[in-house]
């Protein structure tokens, strides 16, 4: 019954799924993780299946966790560099003999493989907020096989899945867990919003008590914030926004500070396309770093999380990320297990 329900589904955003469906994915992920730890093979689950991986942006964890996951499931992850093929492009953004319309790429790959995974944000879509997510939806419209979101400009559903797998792994529950998603300083303003937005969506959906902390000027998508409020109400958790880093840290069980860009960097009508103004906001808030002093303000058993790669010395100090409260590599490993769970469910 589970296979029939899930087969062929896209995984574009966590908001497309119910809490019960996400709990199913979590259960499958932990079972696959347990079995792998016991030496059991999963090569019988997706034998001969092909996942096409289209990366407009660079990657370490995402690419390798998907490729390794497909290998472990008995299939193959087929890497496609958009710069080395006719780059998939939306209507109106095509360049003769350089691009190929998304609808044509989606239908072609549907005849050759079993799922398409895509990462795209920022420069490839000229920092038009939502343009990358629209492209993924266009792929899903035309493809006859599942389309998986490896990060776009709104959502990073597989990172968010790894985040809550890590929370469940460390605390055994979501209820009563105080989850802080905080902005942190970086010298680079070219940081998408997808990670923090997916993190707070999953955490509120699952019933954590969630705090979003950031300086003025670093606000996230109001549509996402409203959804978080609705999730918190439905799940019995909580959601609040705080503009003071030290106040936000008090008593937190999960401390997850990460840089993301201000709205100014996006093109109108969403932003102002003003990189200089964006940099000024960043530079006013260099004190937003997770060092030992700041981590000590959280619960004494708090865990430090980061999606990686981190900007060491800016977002976080070495003694924190390499210290005993850091779970960043458990978090990275959970990318593998969560993605294997989804691929196993939708590609069977």
Image: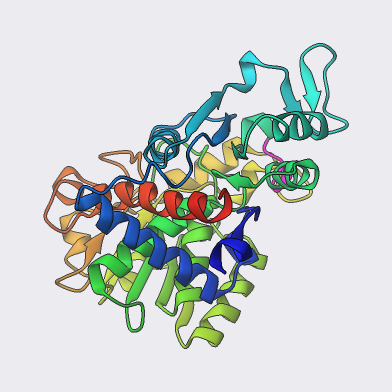
Number of numbered discs on residues: 0
From this viewpoint, which residue is outermost toward the right? 92
In the image, is 154 to the left or to the right of 130? left
Q: Nearer the viewer, residue 14 or 231?
A: 14
Residue drawn at x 16%, y 56% is 292
Quadrant of res 108: top right
Where is residue 328? Give x, y as percent: 27, 50
Residue drawn at x 33%, y 83% is 176
Where is residue 191? Give x, y as percent: 50, 41
- Quadrant where the image shows the N terminus: bottom right
Q: Is residue 224 magenta?
A: no
Magenta span: 127-131
In the image, is 303 to the left or to the right of 149? left
Res. 148 visible in picture:
yes
Q: Nearer the viewer, residue 96 or 215?
A: 96
Q: Nearer the viewer, residue 228 or 5?
A: 5
Where is residue 239? Give x, y as percent: 48, 78
Res. 181 visible in picture:
no
Where is residue 264? Give x, y as percent: 64, 46
Residue drawn at x 59%, y 46% is 149
Q: Is residue 170 above or below residue 209?
A: above
Say how the picture is coloured: rainbow
Q: Nearer the viewer, residue 70 or 300?
A: 70
In the image, is 224 to the left or to the right of 174? right
The dominant secondary structure in magenta is loop
From this viewpoint, which residue is outermost toward the top? 97
Residue drawn at x 79%, y 23% is 100
């Amino acid at each position: 019954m589970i296979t029939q329900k899930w087969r062929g589904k896209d995984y574009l955003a966590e908001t497309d799924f119910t809490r019960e469906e996400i709990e199913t994915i979590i259960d499958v992920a932990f079972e696959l993780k347990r079995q792998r730890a016991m030496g059991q093979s999963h090569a019988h689950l997706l034998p001969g299946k092909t996942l096409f991986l289209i990366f407009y942006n660079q990657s370490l964890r995402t690419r390798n966790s998907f490729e390794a996951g497909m290998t472990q499931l008995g299939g193959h992850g087929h890497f496609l560099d958009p710069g080395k093929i006719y780059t998939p492009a939306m209507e109106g953004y095509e360049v003769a003999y350089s691009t190929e319309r998304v609808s044509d790429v989606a239908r072609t790959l549907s005849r050759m493989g079993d799922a398409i995974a895509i990462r795209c944000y920022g420069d490839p879509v000229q920092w038009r907020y939502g343009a990358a997510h629209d492209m993924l939806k266009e792929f899903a419209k035309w493809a006859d096989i599942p389309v998986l979101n490896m990060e776009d400009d709104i959502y990073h559903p597989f990172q968010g899945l790894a985040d809550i797998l890590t929370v469940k792994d460390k605390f055994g529950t979501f209820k009563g867990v105080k989850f802080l998603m905080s902005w942190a300083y970086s010298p680079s303003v070219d940081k998408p919003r997808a990670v923090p937005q997916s993190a707070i969506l999953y955490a509120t959906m699952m019933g954590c008590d969630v705090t979003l902390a950031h300086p003025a000027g670093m606000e996230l998508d109001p549509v996402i914030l409203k959804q978080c409020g609705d999730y918190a109400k439905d799940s019995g958790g909580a959601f609040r926004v705080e503009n003071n880093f030290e106040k936000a840290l008090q008593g937190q069980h999960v401390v997850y500070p990460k840089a993301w860009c201000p709205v100014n960097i996006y093109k109108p009508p969403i932003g102002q396309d003003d990189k200089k103004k964006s940099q000024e906001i960043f530079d006013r808030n260099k004190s937003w770093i997770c060092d030992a002093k700041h981590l000590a303000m959280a619960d004494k058993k708090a865990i430090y999380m980061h999606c990686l790669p981190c900007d060491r010395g800016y977002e976080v100090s070495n003694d924190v990320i390499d210290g005993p409260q850091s779970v960043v590599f458990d978090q990275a490993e959970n990318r593998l297990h969560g993605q294997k769970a989804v691929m196993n469910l939708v590609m069977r």
